Amino acid sequence: MDMLLSSPTFVFIQVLNSISLGMNLFIIAAGLSLIFGVLRVINFAHGVFYMFGAYIMYTVAQDLELGFVTGVIAAAAGLAVIAVVVERGLFQWLYGKEHLMQLLLTFAIVLIMGDLAKVIWGTDQLSVSYPDGMDGALNLGITFYPSYRLMLAVIGPVIFIGLFLLIERTRWGRLTRAATQDMEMLSALGINVPIIYVTIFLIGAALAGVGGALAAPINSPTPGMDATIIVECFVIVIIGGLGSLWGTFVGALIYGFVFNFGSVIVPNWQDVFAFLLLMVVLLIRPWGLFGKPEREGH
């Protein structure tokens, strides 16, 4: 705490750390929020999609030595393929069902994919190198800061803007928003609603894969890494409001700042601060900061 008050440079570094962490989590949580916002499915398996993205990055960038960018693309593509199989084979039967059934099925997917990851990649902690040119620090004038973390702080807002324009400024985005309001009417107008649903699920899973690939150099791929990330993502989307892109973005930033500064002020209590914030939001606005109250019969 004394260091926060006496060192502006230290505070600046913690601000950048908070933004970097928040933006990496936003990329992952955005997919979870998007899937719930349109499909109304609580995808507990989203964390294992993130884990597979990190493992695919390891295989492509380290084992096959095809480069970091190729690894990110492969993670997005691999999770897109998995998403189509899972959505068409399983998730399409969950639409309109109670959330308990959704949680049970997605938890089963977590167990199956978790064991599959152990069969393919083993149980050891793996290591992914930083991309070329980003393994050092950048001179920001008042301090040096890791180039890779700075890249994460930039790429998050870029993805947010891309998603915002896709949803708010395109015909496909308007159809997607309409599907959340009245799927039956949209289908009666001749729109292929299943295509919209599978595309949304594909984009959400691909975002989880990209988030896992980008996190791989910082959080080494290892079995069980999905359990931590899914809790963090749920905290973020509940704070921001399930289904709200703006809420997910702001919630991720809030979580990043609470986690980083909490670890400085009271070490090892950063998770407690995050959950206390979650409790406060749930008590004041159960639907989240940017969410809307669920309507009966939706």
Image (cartoon, rainbow, N blue to C red):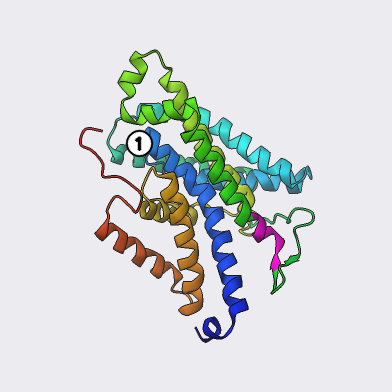
Check disc 1 and give the amino acid type.
Arg
Which quadrant of the structure image shows residue 67?
Answer: top right
- Horizontal placement of 91 versus 53: left or right? left
- For image coordinates 66% across by 60% down, the residue present is 150
The answer to whether residue 172 is above or below residue 27 is above
Q: Is residue 281 visible?
A: yes
- For image coordinates 54% across by 48% down, the residue present is 27
Label 1: how many Cα within 10 Å (few below 14, some 14–19, many 20+): many
Secondary element under disc 1, as helix, strand or loop, is loop
Residue 90: where, in percent of width, then height? Answer: 42, 29
Residue 21: where, in percent of width, then height? Answer: 55, 60
* Quadrant location of the C terminus in the rendered image: top left
Q: In front here: 15 or 29?
A: 15
Q: Does the magenta stretch include residue 146?
A: yes
Which quadrant of the structure image shows residue 134?
Answer: bottom right
Q: In front here: 131 or 258?
A: 258
Magenta span main SS: helix
Magenta stretch, residue numbers:
145-151
- For image coordinates 69% across by 65% down, the residue present is 146
Numbered circles on residues, count: 1
Q: Is residue 88 visible?
A: no
Residue 172: where, in percent of width, then height? Answer: 48, 26
Q: Is residue 221 magenta?
A: no
Residue 179: where, in percent of width, then height? Answer: 37, 27
The residue identified by callout 1 is 40
